[in-house]
Image (cartoon, coloured by chain):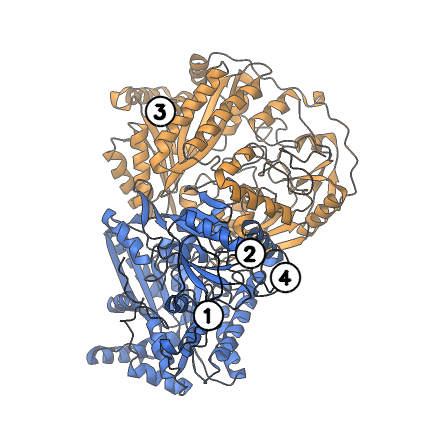
Chain colours: A orange, B blue
Amino acid sequence: MSERERRWNGWGFADESAAVSESARTWLSERLGLGNPLSAVPEQEVRIPPARQLPDLPATTRSDPGARLRYACGCGFSDLVRLRTGALEALPDAVCLPDSAQEVVAVLQVAAAAEVTLVVRGGGTSVVGGVTVRPGPRPTVVLALDRMRGLTSLDPASFLATFRAGTLGPEVEAALAPCRLRLGHEPQSFEFSSVGGWVATRSAGQRSTGIGRIDDLVAGLEIATPGGVWRLPAQPGSAAGPEVRRLVIGSEGRLGVITEATLRVRPVPECRGGVAVLVPGWGAGMEVCRALLQHGPVPEVVRLSDPDETSFGVALTALPRLASSVRDAIFGLRRFRHGCLLLFEWAGRLQDVTLARQAAARAWRDAGGLALGRTGWRRWLDERFRHPYVRDVVLSAGWGVDTLETAARWSVLAALHRAVREAMAQGAQRAGFRIAVLCHLSHAYRDGASLYFTFLWPLRRGEEIGQWQAVKDAASEAIIANGGTITHHHGIGSMHAQYLEREVGAPGLAALEVLAGALDPDGVLNPGVLLPFVPGPGPRTPGGREE
Amino acid sequence: MSERERRWNGWGFADESAAVSESARTWLSERLGLGNPLSAVPEQEVRIPPARQLPDLPATTRSDPGARLRYACGCGFSDLVRLRTGALEALPDAVCLPDSAQEVVAVLQVAAAAEVTLVVRGGGTSVVGGVTVRPGPRPTVVLALDRMRGLTSLDPASFLATFRAGTLGPEVEAALAPCRLRLGHEPQSFEFSSVGGWVATRSAGQRSTGIGRIDDLVAGLEIATPGGVWRLPAQPGSAAGPEVRRLVIGSEGRLGVITEATLRVRPVPECRGGVAVLVPGWGAGMEVCRALLQHGPVPEVVRLSDPDETSFGVALTALPRLASSVRDAIFGLRRFRHGCLLLFEWAGRLQDVTLARQAAARAWRDAGGLALGRTGWRRWLDERFRHPYVRDVVLSAGWGVDTLETAARWSVLAALHRAVREAMAQGAQRAGFRIAVLCHLSHAYRDGASLYFTFLWPLRRGEEIGQWQAVKDAASEAIIANGGTITHHHGIGSMHAQYLEREVGAPGLAALEVLAGALDPDGVLNPGVLLPFVPGPGPRTPGGREE
């Protein structure tokens, strides 16, 4: 497999980047002032400590500095700051690249016997510390599934496709396309994230409103555990006890290494349609979304930006002069002073798409909305996987930027939106800096929806992570206090582990701890991820087993 | 609450029963010969052993013989035989009827301290031994949730309704109807089964094709455990670790007592439509169902009878003379020699129902099917909750009858159907009796469907349960060997516990065992149900803790 080179200290492909328009820079400068640009040190200036002694691992293993550096982190804000400044907390002592479930089992067994910590890694796009190597007394190896890629079987009659865990998003769709099938699971990390990573983190794609979360798409699993290969064959539905598959989905590597997943696929739609709509306000937009989710027809994609995200989105988008005048005229209308951009996409048979669009149009017109046409939707479709590149450019320009997400029932969503925005603003204010908070509603359900927040602030040299932490902590507390889930699709990682008990209760946390203890008795897998405490013998210590 | 009296030794209301037509009796006699009628002993002839000494339980407790008898069993075939013959294996020493989650916690704590076994019971309709009291050295109390009924809160904006666990199906719908909402979860036991029972057993209703399984309808839960009340608040979607709710759904009382569930409801449909269709064969019918499930529009109900079930259904249905001649003429056509009855129901807006019906009509016409009109569907709708009454009448006439169910991916469904039928016939043949096996496909998914088997045989006096067991064992082995799940919606109970490991693998079984051990460390709850071994200290013994 020839691989396009990935950036070692930022998002995505090395030969691709994003531009930030002058108007967006102005938008940020006016609101936030100028911060300190976070420049990036060259690779050769990053200090690579010598690797610790390791046992022979029964799979391809790399310990060259380039590999150790490239597998040290995920893609979170603090990962990025540490990579840019060359101040990594820790590097793995090696990277192990098994090629089969049996090899993974063998590696797990050697690691357990030799007291080696393993960090399981799919595409490496975690933004919550799920794959970040942390300091500890034990040697640490990244167990990367990069070589375990591809479609292993297809059951076209049952619409079931089995993929090896390391298969990346575009490879999944490319393997299905010749059969006129698709998975349709498209998280923002689609180009770089893997089947196994999606399952391990309970991922939701941008089409989850129509397609469902990965939770719903998994029919069967193969998991490597220290005790051997564990197979959960595909079943459409069952009442045979609790759904054990769901124990593994979201287990973030703590209960075993997912090596294969059988996924529920669907036909490539005959037709697609989409539209961008301007609605007079956030409340009105939410009501349009709720009505469609509860009464149907349900669009495949729903995305409603709040007034601030809409305003920043406008600033970010360079339009030809005429189009730009028309836009300014519309946004200048009193009715749209707090205007919100609403995107829909529908997929299916021509007739279904037409009817669904008509029903949506009735809903947005009743709410005082104005259709802006297909262009806004097409632009979102074309650009959606490029948004993370913007982060790197903004950092270089002196502003910090990160995202966080939650979900809640419809009845508390407006209050949750207000509370989180206020808490973030207060968190920044207490720490003495300004902040801009943007939000959109997406991933909608009959009973609620996700809120996805983007926040930007002027960077202070050497305090980047502290600034970020102040805002993140304030947001997390507000989310939990206002009926939201601590994470809708980024996962727990190490970043949210301290909130898990408040999410699932003490018995829920105890249940997950005994499960991890039973399936990984030596505590080899991803210590500090998902669960705040490491199972196994010895005293419980937060954040990792200290011996 | 004034309660309509339930039959103590058979299905349903005491003042309701079913008739079996003369033609159905002829159908059975011709195929099976005559068996020994299983007559029912009067209640006063059932020997009620003296109750064992119990500690004071901190909730309303009954120990009168009538209550002990009525709470001793579920509704499985062996329950029924034992009730009819008065030969119960065991009776509870008391029936405890708590009225709050706090009372349940207190009862669990007293039971743990006093080494009392609890059998948790909702509506008591388990057909797999889930609520059957079994002999053992410990005193046994049935913990019945009968008093914990009603809607506790409704969030109409989020389409979420919270019910106490003992609320029965009709009470759920009656509470929602004034708000023009419905749950739509309608298992055959609908009139007698409870919200808590549905959740504990991973129930699927007859509308699950359109509505989803109870798994999908649960947004939040409250569970009483020996350690206290455990709340899992409603969330539309989350990536906060494995979905802990799904650990509890299907746990059959082993991980705690479900005391409340927040369910995802939906609007009462503007319009309903349905049709009965005759298709030329089982394979053709399955293809029609598969096409609709995979390409849409998905009906709310899909039900396809195999040729034998179709034939028995015809015999069971008394029609007016003219209608009956028309029917006989149609079934007499060469094309319908192996004809299969196919039922659809659609619900939603008038336009959606019309379009869905047109799409289905194209599919069945392409398959050579013939619409029989609305009558067959209306009859199914009116009679569907009365089918279990037939069992009692057939037993009295000398034939045994029971049902079992599985599900599998579409690609193996035809082979699974053949294999299970053959295995059941061979099981009966080895034991020296004849059998009739009927089947329908229902509860369809994009990736597969459920098969629901009904089997009938001539009863031999005193061997009723042995005959049944011979067929059941043969069917279970064939199901597991041919890619089916051991149960699609009846649950594991005690009857399928021995097959759970083959379903979820050794690590899956170990995981469930450590969970039960963690949440119910004294092994008080439902020993022998779900898990083949009882967790807790002491040697592992199958089927209950023997001390």
Residue B160 in percent (x, y) is at: 34, 44
Q: Which residue is denoted by mark 2 in the rendering? A: B523
**Mark 3 touching mark 4, by CB under 8 A?**
no
Q: Which residue is denoted by mark 3 in the rendering? A: A307
Give the foreground label among 3 and 2: 2
- Circle 2 residues within 10 Å: few <14, some 14–19, many ≥20: many
Q: CA distance from mark 1 to mark 3?
A: 73 Å
Whichever of callouts 4 and 2 sits on the residue coming sooner in the sequence is 2
Residue type, label 1: Pro
Q: Secondary structure at mark 3?
A: helix
**Mark 4 touching mark 1, by CB under 8 A?**
no
Q: Secondary structure at mark 1?
A: loop
Out of A428 and B134, give the one closest to the viewer: B134
Q: Which residue is denoted by mark 4 in the rendering? A: B540
Q: CA distance from mark 3 to mark 2?
A: 55 Å
Q: Does label 2 lie on the same chain as label 4?
A: yes
Out of B45 and B7, give the one closest to the viewer: B45
Q: CA distance from mark 4 to mark 2?
A: 12 Å
Q: CA distance from mark 3 to mark 4?
A: 62 Å
Q: Place residue A22 in its image quadrant.
A: top left
Residue type, label 4: Arg
Q: CA distance from mark 4 to mark 1?
A: 29 Å
